[in-house]
Image (cartoon, helix red, strand yellow):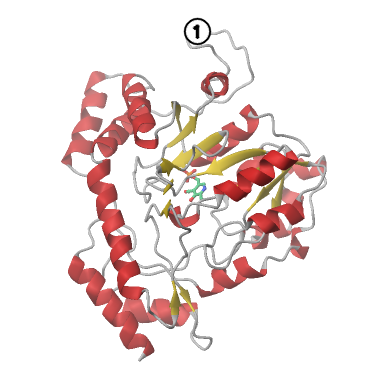
Amino acid sequence: MIPVVDVDIKELEMQAVKEVIESRILIEGKHARAFEKKFCDFTGSRFATTVVNGTCALHLALVALDIGPKDEVITTPYTFIASSNSILFSGAIPIFADVDVETYNIDPEKIEEKITDKTKAIMPVHIFGNPCDMNAINDIAEDRELIVIEDCAQGHGATIDGKHVGNFSSIGCYSFYGTKNLVGGEGGAIITNDEELFQKITSIKNHGRNPAGGYAHYLIGFNYRMTDMTAAVMNVQMDRSEEIMSKRHYNGNKYRELLKDSEHLRLQRILPGHKHSDYIMAPCIMKEDITQKQMIEYLKSNNIGSRSIYNVLSYQQPSYQDLSKWHLSKVIDYPDYTLVSCPNAESIAERHFELPMVTSLTNENINYIVEKLQDFFN
Ligand SMILES: Cc1ncc(COP(=O)(O)O)c(C=O)c1O
């Protein structure tokens, strides 16, 4: 089976972990500092700090920006649940705006419709690695004095006019979960260009300590530190980032070239000047009588890994349909998410399917996959 998920880890990463273990210094330290520096170079941001995972990065960003109880944060429902869950963790209320049916990303016009006097922030998610329309989103944010936090969990290597995602807002949040373009098993990072905010974030992620450490706690904080074993893996992944990313982009470009005239498949539209991270390739089936399930089964029967992702939107999840089990529902009035409807997101959720994009994919694999897709519709 051509895998839909594969981990690009080599001997170098294994050796790096071994060295950390042998050093007996497992806690966040010199490897994390080295990785942060490399991640700044990779993203072109002034500051980066490591965290345990992408979910913690989002939560930390919200807390550091004083977004909390009863504030409304507008986000997309077509994403991994961590995006809106992090809003709930902070005490704020996720408000779902529909996506653009072609880019799969939050639609700036739909954001405007959702703004109320309680709106404090917008959380765009660069879904599958396709950069959101950050110019339009930032125009809205500026007009309405809203904070923007980018969920870049899937955006490693994605740019807008050559500038890396994560740099278009107060804070960009990354994940290095084991399936991402750059992997640490778990792991996350925050980038910002604001020095004061950076200092606050590094303190809050370390129980509110100052950089000298010790047992004085100046802010209420969390333990969101990354281990140095993860950081060591990330250091090697950064050294290999050009090799990894160029393969990802090669795969993405090849699919886009071969499938661009497909009558029955619609690929995610990439806006002019935007560069996709090529994390996930998930076309939508445009032929009414073909279901997502049929397509996935067909691909699997031809030894091509495929799956649907987010076919249940965030507001459709059982946990959102009945929020009474969430402890903060005792003190916060949440919207009735059973009444939310985002038709574009619902259509993508029903009609998309994932194709293999992993770095182990060969040219022959892609040709074979495209041939099988063409056979399917003929
Ligand atoms: C869009 C998105 N946001 C947030 C997260 C959360 O990251 P993590 O799994 O590292 O907590 C993920 C992924 O895993 C994601 O894909």
Rendered position, 210 above or below 291 = above
The residue that appears at 51% across and 37% down in the rendered structure is: 172
Horizontal and vertical percent position of residue 43: 39, 36
Q: Can residue 360 be seen in this view?
A: yes
Looking at this view, is 247 or 209 the one in front? 247
Rendered position, 190 above or below 155 = above
Looking at this view, is 163 or 103 the one in front? 163
The residue that appears at 66% across and 70% down in the rendered structure is: 343
Q: Locate the C terminus by quadrant.
A: bottom left
The residue that appears at 76% across and 49% down in the rendered structure is: 115
Horizontal and vertical percent position of residue 255: 32, 68
Residue corresponding to mark 1: 214
Q: In which quarter of the image is residue 319?
A: bottom right
The residue that appears at 29% across and 48% down in the rendered structure is: 245
Left or right: 93, with 248 as reference point? right
- Bin the neighbour count of mark 1 within 10 Å (Cα to Cα): few under 14, some 14-19, many 20 and up: few
Q: Residue furthest bottom?
A: 378
Rendered position, 357 above or below 88 = below
Rendered position, 77 above or below 367 = above
Residue type of the residue flagged with mark 1: Gly
